[in-house]
Amino acid sequence: MVDLRKGPRGLPSIAHAREVRAHRGPTWTMQAGLVAGGAVIAGFVAHLVVSARDLSSTRDALLAKERAVAATVGAEWFPLRDRVEAEIASAAQPYPGDHIEPEARAGQFRTQPGVYLRLRLADAAGGHDIGQIAAGAKRDAFVACFLHEPNERVKHGDFSGGAIAEQPWNLGQVYAATRILTEDWVRAVKDADEAMRLRVFSEQYDKAIRDEIPLAIEIVKRAQFFLLVIDEDVADANGAADGGPMTEEALQLLAHPARVTLLDLRSNKELLRIRRSGGALVVPAGERQVTDPETLSAMQRQANNCALAGLVDDALSRSSAAAER
């Protein structure tokens, strides 16, 4: 006798679930999913830990190398920098009057290696970052006419840029060459939180060691004097600035008071302090006269600067003659 009630065992819903599982194949259990997810998270955390450790190790190694350079090159550059900046601050004070030491009259500094900076009185007295100001400063015809390397081309009217000799070094050169020794650079390395950014600092360090630090060492070792020119603003220069902020280039177009000081870097003695106002009239001559405004301005600046050098020369000559009487 056949039992007509015989069919799928259990409830129909359970039977349906069995069929669905048979079609889908085996599935993960919740426990297996949690284990897999935990493994992924653990791997990610491990990667972060390893990356952070590698980043920290690279940063520490870079800072250790920087400290080694600071302990050697910085040990000589920092005192020189401090003396130079102190001289700038002193020269920016109310002018106390001319002063010429016998060493300046002898003129030996004219053929020695040195460092030069020219800036406005407003910048020297305003508490500005001297390193930033020096970075934008340039040598000019005052140097070419005042220091005897010799620069006869400039004295005879050749005001081209090539007539200005390599010496003295611009102060901005040594600031740039020692940038890896600054607190700002060290702080930026410490704050670097990405491998790519830290790699940039490593490249900066390598370039400094290869190209810049040797120059800084040469300057620190060889420089005998610091020559400083501080230009005082005059109202007429506002027009030369074309309505913009006052600049060195605008001032040098006009006759204006300028303070010239000379510091002996070996003895830390101020050898020269003179305040003069130099100006010259540039008259283009020849069949092909210069008409380009920029060229004419450059010629006027350099002629004025050379005139200033002549006035300082004259003061030194008069002082020498007086000392010999």
Image (cartoon, grey):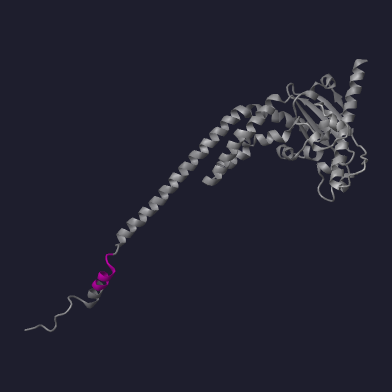
241 left or right, relative to 1 = right
292 left or right, relative to 226 = right
Q: Quick one: quadrant of the C terminus?
A: top right
Q: What is the x, y in percent for residue 110? A: 80, 24
Magenta stretch: includes residue 20 = yes
Magenta stretch: includes residue 273 = no
> In the image, which residues are magenta?
18-26
Say which of 289 and 11 sits in front. 289
Judge whether residue 92 can be spotted in this image: no
**Looking at the image, which residue is at 83% across and 34% down?**
141
**Looking at the image, which residue is at 85% across and 35% down?**
158
Q: What is the x, y in percent for residue 316? A: 88, 24
Q: What is the x, y in percent for residue 101? A: 83, 21
Q: What is the x, y in percent for residue 165? A: 78, 31
Judge whether residue 248 can be spotted in this image: yes
Q: Quick one: quadrant of the N terminus?
A: bottom left
Displayed quadrant of residue 252? top right
Which SS does the magenta portion mostly show?
helix
